[in-house]
């Protein structure tokens, strides 16, 4: 048996993007912006599980709307997505993907209804979820998922008077725990700053996509255009990887060294090139100082 090898070339890549956040964090609007950027003048598809709330944006975007009703099984999601793919939409927005997990007929309902008790009750629901994910991964269109998120609370600590100390542990997407790792890119969004990129929150944004998701900036159509260009294999603006890697290495030495690097070594042009990872560098330097016990 012989094998043929060809040079790997990035082209016609399908994107899977997830935007997770609490109500009011700008998930739907941001998903519409990305889809509009990807599709240009062509319409995109919106699959709506939220009682037609996506129609609030009907005057602002060119899209075809479809209400999705219970039961929110993995097979139901697969069916509507594959039908939309078959009709040739370049982008499909699913709002919300969380219903497949905790909605009526979702995999939590399946586990609760199982005759099997304990962890075994999740075996079949997770198998069905996995089959759905495999179908999504094989799609030849761009999928944008909106997910609800709950704030995880830690109530295990008490103060000197025995009063419970409530501490936020961040936002957790309402979905099967591996869902976000299957994505090309994912972001967690804060209701205090709707639609704003905040890479201090859980995310999966690789360096090749950082120019589309600039910290402190709104997710917009330009981000969708950049992602679509990358997926097509076009030449796009890319980070200065050598500069980024060097800055990251210095950040591990602590805040003092990072400041010296910025103030005494970098040109104004290089500082601009590092702007997309500025918050990351500061956070890394602060952690390095904490690990050495240099700051309180």
Image (cartoon, grey):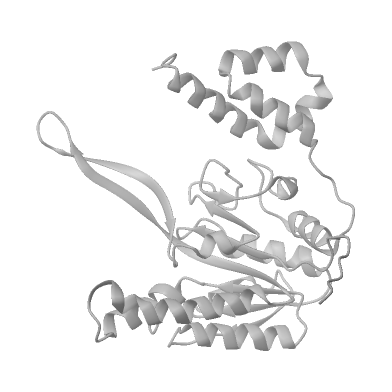
Relative to 233, does residue 166 appear above or below in the rendering?
A: above
Q: Quadrant of residue 240?
A: top right
Q: Please, which residue is most extreme toward the left here? A: 161
Relative to 250, does residue 147 appear above or below in the rendering?
A: below
Relative to 111, does residue 197 appear above or below in the rendering?
A: above
Find residue 184 and report its horizontal and vertical position in percent: 65, 60
Q: State the quadrant of the N terminus.
A: bottom right
- As drawn, is 4 to the left or to the right of 273? right
Find residue 160 and report its horizontal and vertical position in percent: 12, 28
- As drawn, is 216 to the left or to the right of 293? right
Relative to 132, does residue 12 appear above or below in the rendering?
A: above
Q: Quadrant of residue 81?
A: bottom right
Residue 138 appears in the figure: yes
Q: State the quadrant of the C terminus.
A: top left
Residue 274 appears in the figure: no
Q: Residue at x 75, y 80 (%)?
A: 89
Q: Nearer the viewer, residue 253 or 33?
A: 253
Find residue 247 and report its horizontal and vertical position in percent: 69, 26
Q: Quadrant of residue 149?
A: bottom left
Image mark count:
0
Q: Residue at x 66, y 35 (%)?
A: 277
Q: Nearer the viewer, residue 130 or 90?
A: 130
């Amino acid at each position: 048996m012989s094998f043929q090898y060809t040079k790997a070339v990035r082209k016609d890549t399908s994107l899977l993007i997830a935007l997770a956040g609490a109500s009011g964090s700008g998930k739907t609007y941001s998903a519409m912006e990305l889809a509009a950027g990807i599709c240009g003048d062509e319409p995109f598809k919106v699959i709506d599980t939220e009682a037609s709330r996506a129609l609030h944006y009907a005057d602002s975007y060119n899209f075809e709307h479809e209400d999705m009703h219970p039961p929110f099984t993995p097979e139901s999601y697969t069916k509507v997505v594959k039908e939309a793919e078959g009709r040739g939409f370049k982008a499909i927005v699913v709002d919300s993907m969380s219903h497949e997990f905790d909605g009526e007929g979702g995999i939590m309902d399946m586990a609760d209804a199982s005759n099997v008790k304990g962890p075994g009750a999740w075996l079949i629901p997770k198998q069905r979820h996995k089959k759905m994910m495999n179908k999504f991964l094989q799609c030849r269109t761009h999928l944008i998922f909106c997910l609800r998120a709950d704030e995880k609370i830690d109530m295990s600590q008490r103060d000197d008077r025995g009063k419970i100390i409530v501490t936020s542990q961040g936002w957790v997407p309402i979905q099967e725990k591996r869902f976000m790792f299957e994505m090309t890119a994912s972001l967690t969004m804060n209701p205090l700053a709707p639609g704003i990129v905040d890479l201090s929150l859980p995310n999966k944004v690789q360096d090749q996509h950082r120019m589309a998701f600039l910290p402190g900036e709104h997710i917009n159509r330009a981000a969708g255009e950049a992602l679509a260009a990358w997926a097509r294999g076009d030449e796009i603006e890319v980070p200065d990887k050598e500069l980024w890697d060097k800055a990251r290495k210095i950040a591990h030495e602590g805040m003092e060294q990072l400041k010296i690097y910025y103030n005494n070594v970098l040109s104004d042009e290089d500082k601009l090139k590092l702007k997309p990872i500025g918050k990351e560098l500061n956070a890394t330097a602060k952690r390095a100082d904490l690990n050495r016990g240099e700051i309180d």
